[in-house]
Amino acid sequence: MEMLGIWLAVGCTIAIYSFLYKDNVVFKLAEHLYVGLSAGYGFCYAFFKIVWPDLLLPLGRVTVSSLGGTLSEPLSSHENWWLLIPLIFSILILTRFFRRIDWLSKWSFAFIIGTTAGITIPFVTSAYLIKQIVPSLRPLIIVENTLAQSIISSGNAILILIGIGAVLCYFFFSLEQKKTMKVISRIGIYYMMIAFGAAFGYTIMGRASLTIARFQHLVEWGSAKYAYASIVLFFGVTGLVVFTELLSRRGDDNKPSEIPKT
Amino acid sequence: MSNSKQSIHKRYRARWIIFALLAITILASLFIKADFPFPAAQVVQNVYDKIESLPAGSAVVIAFDFSPGAAGELEPMALAMVRHCFKKDLRVIGLTIWDAPAVPIMEDVIKQAATEYQKKDGLDYTLLPFKPGLIYLTMCQDFYLAYPKDYRDQPTRELPVFHGIKNLSDVDYVFDIASLSTIETWIAYGKEKADIELGAACTAVMATDYYPFLQSKQLNGLVGGLGAIAQYETLLQKKERAYQAMIPQSAVHLLIILLIVIGNLIYLKQRKKN
């Protein structure tokens, strides 16, 4: 079973990489398999691990108990009745598919947005705004254990202050960017360019890491232990891409040529 | 052939050359074996030191908030972190808040490390099922309300691994391994409400976004990208996939720098010509 999984993984990896040649049938097959599997897995997991045990099962127990039925597990109380509220709200969202009653879904969205905003705003304001402003307002002269550390910390604080001021000036559109403002804004641009450069460098590292990880697996799975899966499937998938490409080209040749518009 | 068609054809050919060069570079460098010093950055060292400072039996929550698409980059970190916790005899509580497909990855990683260090399910570690949304808030109030059962449908209240834990505040350290924005939500809800000690690992693409949180001490440390993970592996003296990827990584970086220089030279030459 493990071997089958590895062969599938290798086949799908090479099929996805075949996109580097061009968009082709084999790539599309692997792509649809990936999207379909992810969606299917996500749906089943959400239904069987969340909706069923946390919503439908407790409600079902309440219903059985109310109708005088017996339960294998004792029901502590009827406290699970409140679950009807999320159930109703969930069903109301589905009314978007019916034009006449789609306005009902607005109740659910209003509830979701209102609750989320109410919960989120205080936390986010504190975490992202207040807590971020505090370290920006540090003293410029910082005394540490050694002179070198003090110079580095103080230099860092000064650089942060200059950066914040310069970048804010760049985005301050109420004043024309002339003379002093222009110079400060330019410093702001340099700061941003350094930040974008760092982000770009990290992005390259991230993408390269993913490619290297795939290649590490392909090399490992190309050994005799895995029946040379990578080597066999490289030629297999490449052959399939070439074959489907030839077939599609042949199909294009057989198509009746379009009548030129006069 | 018109000039524009010729130019498209040339660009298409150049694309192929770049892909081929990248593939050859990675493949060739994967076979180079070298041992080199790899000093850890302070932000990585902080995470390592935090785990080292925890007494045996402390509880650590490890959030596996990454999808299989980012597993190539973050799975080595997850393995290194779980290994480190088991090495120090810490209790590990694995969970995921972002993505259901992270559950099998979490299971694989924790079970691999548990086998290596002979740790027992329910006693030394546990895995919690995927719960979406603002489950942080429930965790801050009552862990057992948020997760009444573990992944094997066993009541969490009865598991020895949860001994002494009522809510998130009772956990000694939370470490989020994220390929999406869950670090921010852990900061906004977990850190703000429960005042937890929080560390994080993320993909290289996201790393620069989280440096401000280090300065404000909202994160005690950050392991950003495969390079930082290799540093962590070096600290742990378990040089594995991330460390082995550093030679190809360096080779790819050199190649890209070379390509940028060549591209600029070609551009300058063309500009001069025109």
Image (spheres, rainbow, N blue to C red):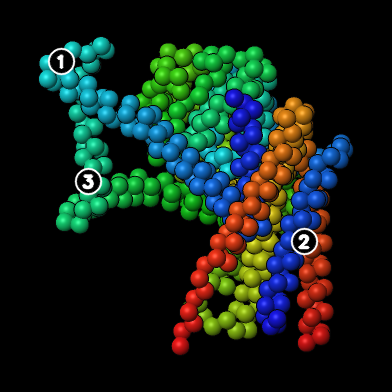
Cα separation between marks 3 and 2: 54 Å
Residue depicted at x 74% and y 66%: B13
Up/down of A262 relative to B133, above or below: below
The image shows residue B210 at horizontal and vertical percentages of 59, 49
Q: Do the residues labelled 3 and 2 touch (CB within 8 Å)?
A: no
Task: Please tell me which of labels 3 and 1 falls first in the chain.
Answer: 1
Location of mark 2 (residue):
B17
Q: How crowded is mark 3: few (under 14 residues within 10 Å), some or many (20 or more)?
A: some
Give the mark toward the camera: 3 or 2: 2
Location of mark 1 (residue):
A69
- Dot 1 lies on which element? loop
The image shows residue A194 at horizontal and vertical percentages of 68, 63
- Dot 2 lies on which element? helix
Residue depicted at x 19% and y 51%: A104
Q: Residues within 10 Å of mark 2 (few under 14, many from 20)?
A: few
Residue depicted at x 48% and y 79%: A259
Task: Determine whether, in the image, residue B100 is placed left or right of residue B2.
Answer: left
Up/down of B79 relative to A29, above or below: above
The chain holding disc 1 is: A
Location of mark 3 (residue):
A92
- Dot 3 lies on which element? helix
Cα separation between marks 3 and 1: 29 Å
Q: Is residue B64 visible in this depiction of the protein? A: yes
Give the mark toward the camera: 2 or 1: 2
Q: Quadrant of residue B20?
A: bottom right
Q: Are marks 3 and 1 in contact (CB under 8 Å)?
A: no
